[in-house]
Amino acid sequence: MENQKYPLVSIVTVNYNQSEITAQCLESLKKITYTQLEILVVDNASQKEDASWLQESYPEITFVQSEKNLGFAGGNNLGIKKAQGEYILLLNNDTEVEPSFLEPLVNKFSTHPETGAVSPKIKYYHRPEIIQYAGLTSLQNFMVRNQAIGYSQKDMGQYDEDRETSYGHGAALLVSRKVIEKVGLMADIFFLYYEELDWCYRIWQAGYKIYYVHDSVVWHKESVSIGLLSPMQVYYKNRGRILYMRRNTSGKNHFLAAAFILFVSVPKNYFYFITRRQWHLLKAYHNSVMWHFKNLFNKKIKQSPHLA
């Protein structure tokens, strides 16, 4: 791509009590070869630190201070609303990027006009030969489960080809402004987990395609933000799974999915946490289920925010 053909890309990353990790991401972005970009760092009301030093240390960024923790979806939405780019890249703060990672993502939009969103190959930062993401399969109709293509596999070049995929990955997801104007922002009712899957599904429903782009590479420092099987993770992952089902299934599929979750998944998970005496995780899981009973008739379940 020649310089005059580079559209402006806005990179949005959300910080929450991890300004040192965010700074490492910003250092990585300093080395990229794409020239037309702006970087927005949204601080999601960090409680354990004052992240404003990032603005002083990195004057090239736009620092956005949120008054409260809006979650992954809400924090990114806040950044998107302030972004000026033709394309918006949501990039986790716990990532580092290959210098030439952005050009192939933008190129996909110019060569495939039906494109709605793209994600790169994502590999583990601490095990750079291992793949985390090379696409995602569709969520099964009633189990509301899917699989990451290439997950935990050694990168032997087996996924060195672009492909259409069911969903992008929230750690690195490029979306065009015109798509966002049409389908809206991420549904911030999710707060954490499943929001990018819901967003990609809405993008697909609007007639666009989602692509995995193999020659763009991002390294992800997985589990820096939440931790493995923390109560927060258990709560929001399970709450999000059910929420996705409620928003995106209908008719027979909705009935089957609801029955499967209520009569199979819920008892199975209760049994799992009880037999392992993981009472703190049991409480988190119970609260995630009860949230849906308390919000059974909440009209906001189906709503999504928009730019305007």
Image (cartoon, rainbow, N blue to C red):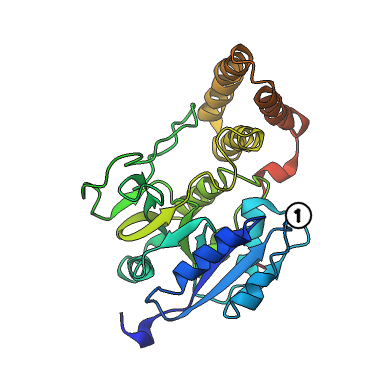
> Residue at label 1?
47
Q: Is residue 9 visible?
A: yes
Q: Quadrant of residue 138?
A: top left
Query: At label 1, which amino acid type do we have?
Result: Gln
Q: Where does the C terminus fall, quadrant-wise?
A: bottom right
Residue at the image point whose x is 34% and y is 51% from the top: 128
Considering every residue shown, the one lying at the far left of the view is 157
Q: What residue occupies the far bottom of the structure in this picture?
A: 4
- Residue 276 location in percent, x, y? 59, 15
Q: Position of residue 96 (x, y in %)?
A: 44, 61
User: Residue shown at 68%/31% (left/top)?
Assistant: 288
Assign a secondary structure to mark 1: loop
Find residue 233 and report its horizontal and vertical position in percent: 61, 37
Question: Which image quadrant: the N terminus?
Answer: bottom left
Where 218 falls versus 8 (above or below)?
above
Q: Position of residue 179 (x, y in %)?
A: 50, 64
Left or right position of 149 against 183: left
Vertical comparison of 302 with 142: above or below: below
Task: State the residue at coordinates (35%, 40%).
Answer: 151
Q: Quadrant of residue 226?
A: top right
**Neighbourhood count class around disc 1 (C-alpha, 10 Å): few under 14, some 14–19, many 20 upward:** few
Rendered position, 255 above or below 218: above
The residue at the point 52 percent across, 51 percent down is: 202
**Figure label count:** 1
Q: Which residue is nearer to you in this view: 133 or 208?
A: 133
Kindly tell me whether residue 187 is visible in this rendering. Answer: no
Q: Nearer the viewer, residue 299 or 121?
A: 121
Which of the 4 image quarters holds residue 55?
bottom right
Q: Nearer the viewer, residue 213 or 183?
A: 213
Q: Is residue 189 left or right of residue 9?
A: right
Tell which of 140 and 193 is nearer to you. 193
